[in-house]
Image (spheres, rainbow, N blue to C red):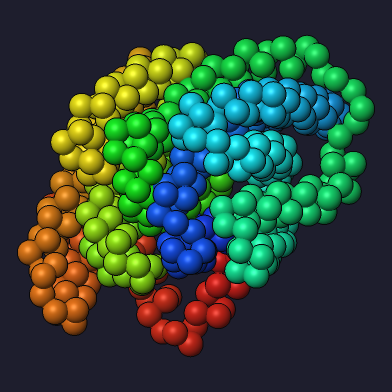
Amino acid sequence: MLKYVKETVKNSAIYGIGNISVKLIGFILIPFLTDPQYLSVRDYGALGVLEAINQIVVSIMGLGLYNAMFRWFYEQSREEQKSTFFTILLTCFLMVVMILMITFYWKEYLTSAFFSTQKYQNVLVLTIISTGLQALSQVPATLMRLQNRAAFFTSSNILKLIVTLLTTLYFLLWCRYGILAIYYGQIAGFITYLVFLIPYFYKNSILKIHLAVFTEMLGYGFSMMIAGISAASINVLDRFVLNSMSGLEEVGLYSLGYKISSTIKVFVIGSVSMALTPLIFRKINDKDSTRFYTKTMTYYGFGMMFCIIGVSLFSKEAIKVFTSSTFYWSSFSVIPILAFSLYFAALKDVVVTGLHITKKTSRISMVTGFVSGLNLILNILLIPYLGATGAAVASLLSQALFFIGAWYFSNRNYPIPYEWKKIVLIFVTGAILVSLSFLVNDLSLIIRLVAKTILLVVFPFILYLFNFYEEAELIQIKTIWIDWRNPLRWKSNFKRLFS
C-alpha cells in the first residue's frame, strides 16, 4: 500500500507542476483583471460567465472519450492504442469544427441570450475557438497520463504557460484590448502547445480508424459526457442565475471568490486525479485493490481538508493580496463555503470507482442530471435572498448530494468498505475549526494570522485524539518525521522521492 501512496504522491507533485502551470495564469492576472483601468467590474463578471460556457462546451466537444481512453487503454495492443488515439483525435476535431460553425452562425442570438447585449459577440467566438483548442489538447494530455509521462506533460504545459502569459500581458497591458486579450493569449498558448506536440502525435498514431473499439468507447464516453456536462452545470449554473437575477457585478464578486477557493481544485484535486486515475484502473485485478480504494478515500479526504482549512482560514487576507480594489473585498465570505463544497467534489471522484470498474457509467449520468436540476432550483431559491452567498450554499448542498448519490449507486454495483467514521470526523473537525476563525476576523492582522495558523496546525492532532490513525500509519508518520525534520537532508530526500 505504501508503495502506491508514494507513487501517487510523486506523480501528483510532477503533474501538479504541469497542472499549476495551466491554471497559474488566472491567478497571476487577478490584480490586473480586477483593476478598473484594464477591466470593468461588468467585464470581469462577463468573464465569469464565459468561463462557465467553456466548462460546459469542452465536455461536449470531447464526447467523454478522454474517460473512455482510461478504461480501454490497458486492454489494447500497441497498434490498437495508436489507431484508437487517432480515431479519438479526429472525432474531437470534427466536433470542434461543427460547434465553432454553429457558434459563428448564431453568435448574435447567443450573445443576446447570455448577456442581453451584443458587446461580447466577438469575445464569445474567441471563447469557443479557445475551448476547441483546449478540447484537442486534452487528447494528447490524456495519453501522456496513460503512458505515465508526467515530466513530458509538465514541460509541455510550462511552454504553454509562458506563451499564454506573455501574449495575454502584451494585449492586456500594452494594447489595452480588455477581455479580448485573455482569449488571444489562450489561443496563442494552445496553438504553440499543439505544434510542439506534432512529433508526439506522429509517434503515437496511425492513420486508421479503430471502429470496433470506438463504437464501444462512444457508448461509454457518451454517458461520461452527459455526466461531465451535468457536473459542469453544477459548477457553473450559479453564474448564469446570478447574472440573470443580480447582474454582472454580482457575478464578478462571486467569480473572484470562486477563483480563489478553486486553488484547491487546481493544486490538489486536478493533480491528484491525474496521478490517481490511471493507478485505479491498473489495480482493478490486484488482490489488495479493495484496501487501496478504501485508504485512498481516507488519505485523500485528510489531505483535502487540510488544504480547505488553510484556504478558508486565510480567505480575508488572500482577497486583499490578490486585488487592491476594495469593491471585491466582500467576496471573501463565499470562499469557505465554496472550499468545503470541494471536499465532496473530490471524494465523489473516488466513490465512482466502482461504476468505472463495472462500466456502469450511465448511473453517473443519472445522478449528475438530477443534481444539476436540483442545483438550478437551489440557486433560483437562494440567490434572490443571499446573492453570491446563496450561490455558494447551493454549490455546497449540490456537491454533498452528488457525492451521496454517486456512492449509493457505486456501492450497489461494486461495494467498497470506506472508512465512513473517519470521513465524517475529518469534515466535522474542519468545519468547527473554520467556524472558530470567524471569532478573530475583526482583530488586528498579527493576532489574526497567529490564531488562524494555530487552528490549521492543530487539525491533525485533534484527529489523533479521536484515534484517527492506525498503528502502522503512526509508525510511518514517525519515520517520515525523522527523515524530513533535518533541512540538510531535504535535497537527498527529494532525489529519492522522484527517482
Left or right of 135, for residue 179: left
**Residue that sits furthest to the left in the current view:** 439
**Residue that sits furthest to the bottom in the current view:** 488
Q: Nearer the viewer, residue 214 or 137?
A: 137
Q: Position of residue 347 (x, y in %)?
A: 36, 38
Q: Position of residue 307 (x, y in %)?
A: 33, 58
Q: Nearer the viewer, residue 431 or 11?
A: 431
Q: Position of residue 340 (x, y in %)?
A: 27, 46
Q: Where is residue 141 in the image (x, y as percent from the top left)?
A: 69, 44
Tell me if I can see residue 422 in this picture. Answer: no
- Residue positioned 48% across, 87% down in the render: 488
Tell me the quarter of the image containing the C terminus.
bottom right
- Residue positioned 45% across, 52% down in the render: 44
In this picture, is 420 found above or below 193? Answer: above
In this picture, is 100 found above or below 493? Answer: above
Left or right of 73, for residue 297: left
Which image quadrant for residue 171?
A: bottom right
Left or right of 408, for residue 217: right
- Residue positioned 44% across, 56% down in the render: 40
Left or right of 385, for residue 212: right
Q: Which of 70 and 386 is in front in this view?
A: 386
Q: What count of labels does the image hold?
A: 0
